[in-house]
Image (cartoon, rainbow, N blue to C red):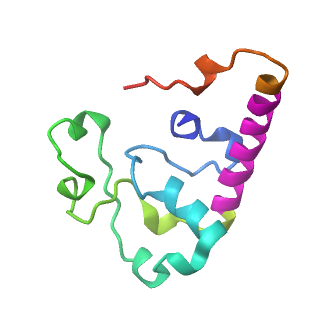
Amino acid sequence: MDLLEDPSPLELPDLDPQGEAHAGIFETAPMLYLREHLVRERLLKGLPPQRISFSQFGGAGSFRELGNGLGYTGDPSRATAEIGGRIIEHYADRFKGLILRHVRGEDVYDSLRFSGF
């Protein structure tokens, strides 16, 4: 969730987190990096951005009900394996520190809790 608030650690200045929530660039890119064969890349480039604000989620029963009915928000068409690698490395580094703090006996509960909505 931190990259949706501030994607600057990825050092990709034109990466826009606006409207990203489900199956957009922040979820599709890691899939391209980790399991490219599971992504239908030929379909990605034709998907128009669906910038959905979090306030629009309230009345929806599923992601399919939002935007164009395809079940994604944001812009998966810009996803690449390179971006996915940067996202994976970011979270690997972030969680490594969290795990080490926990093993040392520190209370990490507040770091795991998310209440941003």
Vertical arrangement, residue 71 with respect to residue 44, above or below: above
Residue at the image position 22 percent from the left and 56 percent from the top: 67
Q: Quadrant of the C terminus?
A: top left
Left or right placement of residue 65 versus residue 48 in this view? left
Q: How many marks?
A: 0
Residue at the image position 68 percent from the left and 20 percent from the top: 108
Q: Which quadrant of the structure image shows residue 72?
A: bottom left
Within the magenta stretch, is there residue 106? Answer: no
Q: Main secondary structure of the magenta part?
A: helix
Residue at the image position 37 percent from the left and 45 percent from the top: 19
Residue at the image position 20 percent from the left and 63 percent from the top: 69
Query: Can I make out residue 35 in this image?
Result: yes
Query: Can I make out residue 45 in this image?
Result: no
Left or right placement of residue 15 versus residue 50 in this view? right
Within the magenta stretch, is there residue 95? Answer: yes
Nearer to the camera, 109 or 78: 109
Residue lying farthest to the bottom in this orientation: 42
Please state the extent of the stretch shown in magenta in the rendering: 83-100
Nearer to the camera, 3 or 116: 116
